[in-house]
Image: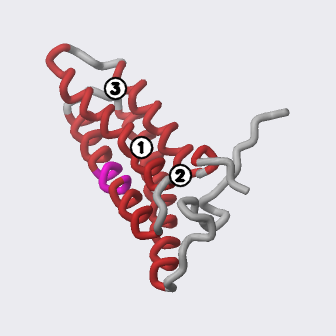
Amino acid sequence: MSSGVRELRVWQESVSLAGDVIRAIRQSIRRETKSVSDQVMATAVAVGTHIAEGYGRHTAHEQRASYIAAKSALLRLETELAIARHAELIPAGAFTELTTRSSQVARLLAGYIVYLDRQIADGEAPPRLGKPTPPIAILDSVRAPS
């Protein structure tokens, strides 16, 4: 039995990515670039927020809409990171690491959306109302050491 959104690997990765984006951007915040830095950080947070909202939705259609919103936010984040790199707000190494991690989240999201598309096409509701059970590659339990 699932204990919550914290078990979704896509959520875990998006939260970790947001934290890393915030740390990278925070190091270069200057008064003249504060609005850009704030926007990048807000977009990074939005990815995980949309995933969490999708997890709590009651139908596959509603869940899919939230995951599509997360995918859109992720695309915005990738663009904002590219702009920040071009403006030299983040170092090249950090940019490479963040875009690699962003691609990982994008792959996980794409898998989850395909799963929901199949549920919708088959006319099936997710197994647990509001809490779909995706393929094992997408859902990884993280257990704290006892």
Q: Residues within 10 Å of mark 2 (few under 14, many from 20)?
A: many
Answer whether residue 130 is visible to the viewer in this image.
yes
Residue 64, quarter of the rendered image: bottom left
Label 3 sits on a secondary structure element that is helix
Q: Which residue is mark 2?
A: 10
Q: Which residue is mark 3?
A: 25
Q: Residue at x 45, y 64 (%)?
A: 110
Query: Tags 2 and 1 in contact by the CB under 8 Å rule?
Result: no
Q: Earlier in the sequence, mark 2 or mark 1?
A: 2
Quadrant occupied by the N terminus: bottom right
Q: CA distance from mark 2 to mark 1?
A: 11 Å
Label 2 sits on a secondary structure element that is helix
- Front-lying residue, 47 or 95: 47
Q: Earlier in the sequence, mark 2 or mark 3?
A: 2
Q: Amino acid at mark 2?
A: Val
Q: Nearer the viewer, mark 2 or mark 1?
A: 1
Label 1 sits on a secondary structure element that is helix
Q: Position of residue 35 (x, y in %)?
A: 18, 25
Which region is colored magenta? 70-75
Q: Position of residue 15 (x, y in %)?
A: 49, 39
Q: CA distance from mark 1 to mark 3?
A: 19 Å
